[in-house]
Structure formats: structure tokens, C-alpha cells
Amino acid sequence: MAETREEWIKKRAYALWEEEGHPTGRDSIHWEQARHERDALDGSARASDGKVAKPRAKRTVVSAKTNGGVTPAPKRTASRKTAS
């Protein structure tokens, strides 16, 4: 049987609560975040013609030289002009 929207939100809110280490007093924040995530999923799952569209995978750019690590930007050096 398919899971209802409310069941999905309830499970996601619980997962968010667990991920944050079981904090007290943040239940409404977790519920709202889960509701927004579900709304985003519902919106992205439908194309403009009403047909269900597959979500695209997120792409990341990884440099082959750094073996997947992040390379800091090179430092800029100020060029000084000499007076003639």
C-alpha cells in the first residue's frame, strides 16, 4: 500500500530529529522542513504537461589532479610599478 503524504512527512521529520541528536523543542522545525521537502518533491515530480518526470542527478566537478580534494585558489601578488 502506498504511503500517504502525512506518513511521509512524519517519517522524514523523525529522521531529521534523529540526525540532529534528538534535540527537544524542535519538533515544529523538523515538521516544517519535512513538509517543505515533500512539497519540493511533489513539485519536481511533475512536468508542465502533468506527466511524472524523473529527477536529475546532481553533478559535482572533481579535479583529477587533486584526487577529489578541493584546491585553494592561487594567491594573488601585487605588481609594483617602478617610477622612471
Image (spheres, helix red, strand yellow):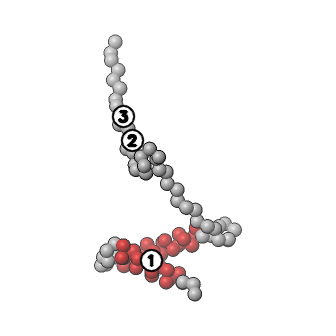
Where's residue 29, x and y in %? Answer: 38, 74
Residue at (49% x, 80% y) in the render: 8
Residue at (43% x, 51% y) in the render: 68
Q: Quadrant of the N terminus?
A: bottom right
Q: Do the CB atoms of the residues marked 2 and 1 lie less than 8 Å apart?
A: no
User: In the figure, residue 65 lies in which quadrant?
Assistant: top left
In the image: residue 31, left or right of residue 56: left
**How many residues crowd around disc 1 within 10 Å: few (fewer than 14), some, or many (20 or more)?**
some
Residue at (57% x, 84% y) in the render: 2
**What residue does disc 1 label?**
12
User: Up-down: is 24 above or below 62?
Assistant: below
Where's residue 14, x and y in %? Answer: 40, 79
**How many residues crowd around disc 2 within 10 Å: few (fewer than 14), some, or many (20 or more)?**
few
Q: Quadrant of the C terminus?
A: top left
Q: Indicate which disc residue 76 carries.
A: 3
User: Up-down: is 44 above or below 14?
Assistant: above
What SS does tag 3 mark?
A: loop
Where's residue 56, x and y in %? Answer: 58, 62
Q: Indicate which disc residue 73 carries.
A: 2
The number of numbered discs placed on residues in the rendered structure image is 3
User: In the figure, residue 42 lies in which quadrant?
Assistant: bottom right
User: Up-down: is 36 above or below 62?
Assistant: below
Would residue 36 be seen by someone viewing this image from the given angle?
yes
Query: Which residue reaches farthest bottom?
Result: 1
What SS does tag 1 mark?
A: helix
Kind of residue sitting beneath label 1 = Arg
Q: Compute the Cα span from label 1 to label 3.
A: 46 Å
What SS does tag 2 mark?
A: loop
Kind of residue sitting beneath label 3 = Arg
Where's residue 74, x and y in %? Answer: 38, 38
Residue at (51% x, 74% y) in the render: 38
Query: Which residue reaches farthest top?
Result: 84
